[in-house]
């Protein structure tokens, strides 16, 4: 059995949301709506497909499920706190701060999905940090697009996991 049976479901979720983030970079006026639709769509599709995607890989442990749920709940709380903290700094800072929190929440998810998501977390955090502090004049749509590409690529890699 594979040590991270949830990996394909996580990959599917990332593929959908990554594609919607990329669409939001191409259509910035609809960025927030596309992400909202993407999250809903990814959640529904993943909820339907995840059991059959995980079944050939084994059964997740209770720790993996607990870390997954805990990471998502903590992310939701931290996003609200961060948005309140940076709200006066404008939309760009809000968006990049949210992307930073999302990247950080991928790190503990390595318990449930394996090292690929930790690498994705590091890369998405670096992308957000680049926009927030290293290159504050970098185009937001470029940073947004790159975040989507990272998530899409990470999701595809996670979906390609096969038993040996």
Image: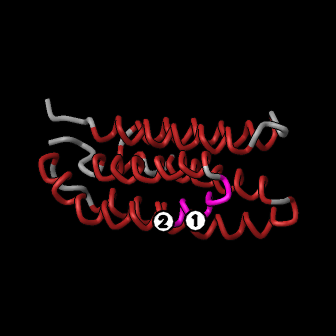
Task: Give the residue displayed 43% in from the left and 51% down from the top.
Answer: 109
Magenta span main SS: helix
**Which part of the image, by quadrant, shows the N terminus?**
top left
The reply to whether the magenta stretch includes residue 17 is no
The reply to whether the magenta stretch includes residue 33 is yes
Instruction: For label 2, count other residues whose C-alpha is less than 10 Å away and answer few (under 14), some (14-19) or many (20+).
Output: some
x and y percentages locating residue 49 in the rendered image: 23, 59
Where is residue 127, by image quadrant? top right
Task: Using the image, determine if residue 119 lies above or below residue 89.
Answer: above
The stretch in magenta equals: 28-36
**Which part of the image, by quadrant, shows the C terminus?**
top left
Circle 2 — which element?
helix
Which residue matches tag 1?
33
Task: Give the residue displayed 54% in from the left and 53% down from the top.
Answer: 105
Task: Give the residue displayed 46% in from the left and 60% down from the top.
Answer: 38
Are discs 1 and 2 less than 8 Å apart at CB?
A: yes
Which residue matches tag 2?
37
x and y percentages locating residue 55 in the rendered image: 14, 53
Task: Give the residue displayed 24% in from the left and 43% down from the top.
Answer: 3
Left or right: residue 135 versus residue 107 is: right
Give whichever of 148, 126 is nearer the camera: 148
Task: Using the image, determine if residue 115 lies above or below residue 83.
Answer: above
x and y percentages locating residue 51 in the rendered image: 19, 60
Where is residue 146, by image quadrant? top right
x and y percentages locating residue 84 in the rendered image: 77, 70
Cα separation between marks 1 and 2: 6 Å
């Amino acid at each position: 059995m594979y040590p991270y049976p949830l990996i394909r479901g996580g990959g599917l979720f990332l593929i959908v949301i990554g594609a919607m983030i990329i669409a939001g970079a191409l259509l910035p006026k609809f960025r927030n709506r596309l992400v909202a639709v993407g999250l809903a769509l990814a959640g529904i599709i993943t909820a339907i497909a995840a059991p059959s995607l995980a079944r050939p890989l084994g059964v997740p442990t209770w720790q993996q499920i607990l870390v997954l749920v805990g990471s998502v709940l903590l992310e939701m709380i931290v996003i609200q706190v961060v948005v309140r903290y940076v709200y006066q700094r404008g939309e760009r800072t809000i968006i990049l701060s949210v992307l930073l929190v999302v990247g950080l929440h991928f790190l503990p998810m390595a318990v449930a999905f394996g090292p690929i998501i930790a690498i994705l977390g590091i890369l998405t955090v670096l992308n957000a940090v680049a926009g927030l502090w290293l290159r504050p004049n970098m185009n937001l749509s470029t940073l947004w697009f790159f975040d989507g590409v990272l998530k899409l690529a990470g999701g595809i890699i996670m979906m390609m996991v096969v038993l040996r």
